[in-house]
Amino acid sequence: MTRPKRALLTAFLTLAAAYLAICSAAYFWQRKIIYHPNRAVYATPAEAGLPFEAFKLASSDSIRFTVWRIPNTESQSVVVCFHGNADNISANIDLYHTWYNLGATVVAFEYRGYLDSDGEPSEEAIERDLVVLADTMRSWYAGKNIKVIAMGRSLGGAVAAKFATKYQVDGLILESTFSAMHDVAQLQFPFLPTKLLLREKYDSEIILRELETPILVIHSTMDEIVPFHLGRKLYNAANEPKEFVEIQGGHNAGVNMSRDQIEAAYRNFLKKIRLQK
């Protein structure tokens, strides 16, 4: 083999080895990229003047996770809230206050490894915890004429969609949420075979194609983390009845920038769910 050919082969093998190393890192370290467990306590519902109960539930593998309940005793509606990948349940007190003021009981689910929950987060593990949450919800509201809405922001939207496969919700709200994890990964890492590498799939698009429940999708045209077209893709996958609300502001800033519009969408959706037979 001539020297130029040997040099070319060496360069090719070096690049191939580097590419395989990147792929390997993406496969084994993806949970570090997706999840950012946050254990900070920002506030409690009690500090906002809300009634407040904290529960520790045990999953099938004995891992204990936290659930908060903010009971609205006069309400026939429950909203189950799922937060984003870098938040925890203590970072969303304003959201709970909004739903409480709209006349709903709030249930806030905490992921493994976040706040004071044990273990480490993964799609498979969180799904096990959702089964326990669903069983707990059935025990709380058995025989009661309660309307249950699941809602999530960002990653929480994908978790809310999963919850809807474990518990028969009356409505689903997906806010700033992606269609599937591989769609986001493809945009962030277009040079990687993300469909092959991803273990954390969170394919909400598939779930919505099968789900028969009212859907509200809220997404900003200015979202810099989960692009607007992924919100539309998620909406297009859903069955009727469904509604799309277009807001303004960045992925995190849109909550405040479009607060009035979002609250109006919540109010209207809750009203429609309550009128369902």
Image (cartoon, rainbow, N blue to C red):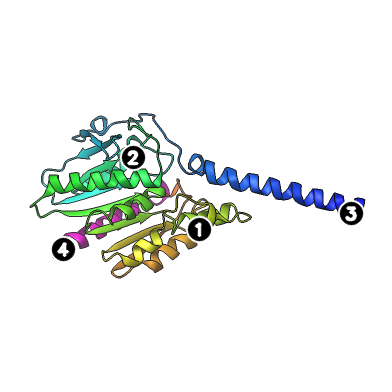
Identity of the residue furthest to the front in this view:
1
The residue under label 2 is 92
Q: Quadrant of the N terminus?
A: bottom right
Residue 255 percent across, percent down from the top left: 39, 48
Amino acid identity at mark 1:
Asp
Secondary structure under badge 4? helix
How many C-alpha atoms fall within 10 Å of the one at disc 1: few (<14), some, or many (≥20)? some
The residue under label 1 is 183
Q: Which residues are magenta?
A: 255-277
* Residue 255 appears in the picture as rendered: no
Secondary structure under badge 2? loop
How many C-alpha atoms fall within 10 Å of the one at disc 4: few (<14), some, or many (≥20)? few
**Label located before the other in sequence (2 or 1):** 2
| In magenta stretch: residue 266 | yes
Q: Which residue does the image show at 24% across and 36% down from the upper left? A: 57
Q: Which residue does the image show at 67% across and 49% down from the upper left? A: 19
Residue 26 percent across, percent down from the top left: 56, 46
- The image quarter in which residue 37 lies: top left
State how far apart marks 2 and 1 are (Cα).
26 Å
Amino acid identity at mark 2:
Asn
Q: Is residue 236 above or below residue 131?
A: below
The residue under label 4 is 275
Left or right: 69 in relation to 218: left
The residue under label 3 is 1
**Label located before the other in sequence (4 or 1):** 1
Residue 231 percent across, percent down from the top left: 44, 60
* Residue 34 appears in the picture as rendered: yes
State how far apart marks 2 and 4 are (Cα).
27 Å
